[in-house]
Image (spheres, rainbow, N blue to C red):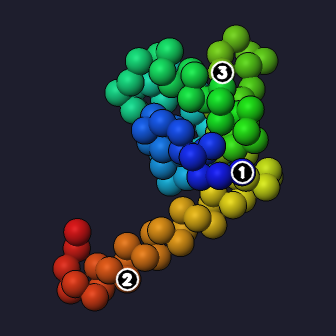
Amino acid sequence: MKLEDVFRTRTAARLLDLLLASPDRVYTQAMLVSRLGLDKRTVRDAVNRLAALGALDVDARFGMKLVSLDTESALGRALQVFYRSLSDIRQQQTHVNGREQ
């Protein structure tokens, strides 16, 4: 798998950024649309594609889509490590620059 497979669109990157910030949180698809400020279809397409890759868990049993990061999948775990590493780099850069960015 390549990074472009996961981060194919800006929507996918924004969606993952939101989910990785709180990996145990569950969102409805409507909540994601609202939080991201994007069209319902755009979010739905990104959710479906990322779920097919194994990054997201989607539960539609209760008449609405519940979406969360799949923290048990290999891709979900790898994304969490990647996200934490990026956060560490940002903190190091902030410390080196001596200011908050």
Taking 101 as reference, is 25 left or right?
A: right
Labels 1 and 3: the sequence-earlier one: 1
Residue 57 placement (x, y as % from top left): 73, 36
Please name the residue shown 28% across and 88% down the image.
96
- In the displayed structure, 15 sits above or below 94; it is above
In the rendered image, which residue does mark 2 sit on?
A: 92
**Nearer to us in this view, 24 or 57:** 57
Can you tell which quarter of the image residue 79 is in? bottom right
Taking 13 as reference, is 98 left or right?
A: left
Can you tell which quarter of the image residue 78 is in? bottom right
Which residue type carries mark 1? Met
Q: Secondary structure at mark 3?
A: loop
Which residue type carries mark 2? Gln
| Position of the C terminus by quadrant | bottom left
In the orientation shown, which residue stands out farthest toward the top? 63
Q: Secondary structure at mark 2?
A: helix
Measured Cα–Cα span from mark 2 to mark 3:
38 Å
Measured Cα–Cα span from mark 1 to mark 3:
26 Å
- In the displayed structure, 46 sits above or below 80; it is above
Crowd around label 3: few <14 · some 14–19 · many ≥20 (10 Å): some
Measured Cα–Cα span from mark 1 to mark 2:
29 Å
Q: Secondary structure at mark 1?
A: loop
Labels 1 and 2: the sequence-earlier one: 1
In the rendered image, which residue does mark 3 sit on?
A: 65
Residue 1: image tag: 1
- In the displayed structure, 6 sits above or below 49; it is below
Please name the residue shown 43% across and 38% down the image.
10
**Nearer to us in this view, 57 or 96:** 96
Which residue type carries mark 3? Lys
**Nearer to us in this view, 31 or 95:** 95
